[in-house]
Amino acid sequence: MRQTVEILLNLIEKLNSQVKELQAENQRLRSENNRLKGEQGKPDIKALKFKGELNNHSSEKERETPKKHAPVQQK
């Protein structure tokens, strides 16, 4: 039974790698076909960065350093 499961897992792994190769080849051929027809290829879309990722607005450094306060004047 164990040997049968091992054979099946090896077969699944082999088929999965073939599927990935065929998908990559299919995409390459589609892009080539579109290029030959004069159409644009698949666009290279880059992930957008949120404003918070562009600049660090964290107040952690401010919390770590002690602030000097003016002495309180008593009446």
Image (cartoon, helix red, strand yellow):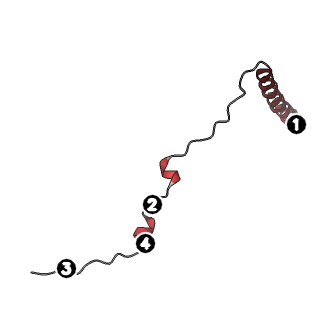
Element class at badge 4:
helix
The crowd level at tag 2 (other Cα within 10 Å; few <14, some 14-19, many 20+) is few
Q: Position of residue 62 (x, y in %)?
A: 41, 68
Tell me the residue that label 2 is attached to: 58
Between the C-alphas of marks 1 and 4, the distance is: 55 Å
Between the C-alphas of marks 1 and 3, the distance is: 77 Å
Element class at badge 3:
loop
Q: Earlier in the sequence, mark 4 or mark 2?
A: 2
Q: Classify residue 15 as left or right of residue 58.
A: right
Query: Disc 2, disc 3: CB below 8 Å?
Result: no
Mark 1 or 3, which is nearer the eye? 3
Name the residue type under label 2.
Ser
Q: Quadrant location of the C terminus? A: bottom left
Q: Position of residue 34 (x, y in %)?
A: 76, 21
Q: Which mark is residue 64?
A: 4
Q: Classify residue 72 as left or right of residue 28.
A: left
Q: Quadrant location of the N terminus? A: top right
Q: Earlier in the sequence, mark 2 or mark 1?
A: 1
Q: Classify residue 72 as left or right of residue 19.
A: left
Q: Earlier in the sequence, mark 2 or mark 3?
A: 2
Q: Earlier in the sequence, mark 1 or mark 3?
A: 1
Tell me the residue that label 1 is attached to: 10
Tell me the residue that label 3 is attached to: 72
